Image: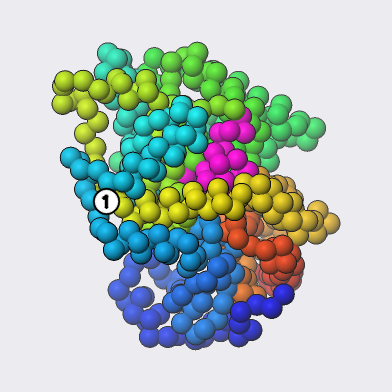
Amino acid sequence: MSTPSIAMHNNAKHSDWIARTLSAVWHPCTQMKQHELFPPVCITRGQGPWLYDDQGEAYMDCISSWWTNLFGHANERINQAIIAQLNKIEHVMLAGLTHPGVVELSEQLSALTGGHLGHTFYASDGASAVEIALKMSHHFWRIQSKAQKKEFICLANGYHGETLGALSVTDVPLFKEAYAPLIQGVHIAPSPDFRLAPEGVDAREWALGAAAHLENILENHHESIAALILEPLVQCAGRMGMYDPVYLRRARELCDRFEVHLICDEIAVGCGRTGHFFASEHAQIWPDFLTLSKGISAGYLPLSLSMTTERIYQAFYGDSMSEGFLHSHSYTGNPLACAAALAGLQIFKDDHVLATNTIKAQSLKDAFSWVEGDGRLMHLRQQGMILAFDLDAKTQALHPQFSSAFFKNALSHQLLLRPIGPTVYVMPPYILEEEQIHWMGSEIQKVLHQTLSARS
Ligand SMILES: Cc1ncc(COP(=O)(O)O)c(C=O)c1O
């Protein structure tokens, strides 16, 4: 396979942009001082799966630009849809006004759930959609004269974003610790992540065991609990922890039994990532709230949403203003973002994306079959277009700086990858060709050898 550029990444190269970004931009999820050793890469354009930096070097976007991109960068069909919308109107406020794009998108999303989640409330970033689901859930119970239902259950190692409400239901100590005094306490149920299972216990059994703990929490606290929030099937920020769909089925049953809402956060796993359009479909369940962001605008523009049921919508419908859901963001349901989303949904139909992804997922599996034969690696796992593996404990101990070293080495192999601690994963855009998938797999093997043969 020929790659777009053969120039090697040069750590020492500092363009003007780098100096200026370091002086003026406070980058997210970053200890800025680390950029003294390894400066950020300045991306100036993209095409398909490739990102190009200001030196003309190319990197395959193996992680879909923070799990957002579905159909490649500068996709002609999505570009044209946005341009067409731009020539009509760039933004419409959604209180008191509406626009065709947001209506069509809401109708199409409702149809994708068979009408179960027929009402969609919009925001911009993922965390805001989570805030909406949490607030709506408690507000619903308050309207039902159950205002004491104001607590939430989340899963150990779960991630739902970093605004205060979303952070309260996130269980990643690194992100949460500094803000602990600012956030509400939650019930944390054990994770069904299959990596945690002892030898001899299968994924289904392990998930049912975790669900038994959930049942226990619900039995004891359901009267004060509004909702359970979880990431269906893959805890992405939790180092791609994967689990059996039986957990979702049990969670749905338990939530029904104990009168607690189920919030499925599909911000990372929705839009076809796991094989079905919605990850919840693997368990044949629908939640009371389903959040989407990232892939819903095909990775183009900030768009997030929380879908819900007729029952919940009707509870807020009435004469009293205070029973309405009085929440808003200025760019809620932005028309350009909706145009990108509609173009993305059209591509799903025109290109039979879910069916082709089944074939691509098999290629992905084949391209990483070498992982099984490498004694330093463990937990090779896959759910649709997400594949991950971990370093074993001994190798982790020998390489405490593994993820940053791997990231740098990957760039010199024309790959954009961001291991999470000792977990290497790929979550590529759906447009990768078979040959590109295999190239990615074999280059990652080289990067791994390079990284593990050096002391970090
Ligand atoms: C499952 C999940 N929920 C919520 C979020 C937060 O989305 P955002 O970063 O757009 O606020 C993320 C982001 O990675 C996520 O993976």
Give the residue at x 53% y 22%.
252
The image quadrant of residue 144 is top left
Horizontal side of 179 relative to 171 (left or right) equals left
x and y percentages locating residue 414 in the rendered image: 62, 75
Give the residue at x 69% y 78%.
2
Does 63 appear above or below 306?
below
Q: Quadrant of the N terminus?
A: bottom right
405 in magenta: no
x and y percentages locating residue 356 in the rendered image: 66, 51
Most foreground residue, 127 or 320: 320
Horizontal side of 127 relative to 428 (left or right) equals left
Does 301 appear above or below 150?
below
x and y percentages locating residue 451 in the rendered image: 68, 70
| Total numbered labels | 1
| Residue 442 in view | yes
Q: Quadrant of the C terminus?
A: bottom right
Main SS, magenta residues:
loop
| Residue 445 in view | no
Amino acid type of disc 1? Tyr
Horizontal side of 95 relative to 407 (left or right) equals left
Q: Residues within 10 Å of mark 1 (few under 14, many from 20)?
A: some
Give the residue at x 43% y 30%.
117
The part of the chain drawn in magenta is 267-283
Most foreground residue, 408 or 387: 387
Q: Seen from this angle, which residue lies furthest right?
A: 373
Label 1: which secondary element? loop
Q: Is mark 1 within 8 Å of ligand 1?
A: no
Horizontal side of 292 relative to 328 (left or right) equals right
* Residue linked to disc 1: 331
Give the residue at x 34% y 80%.
20
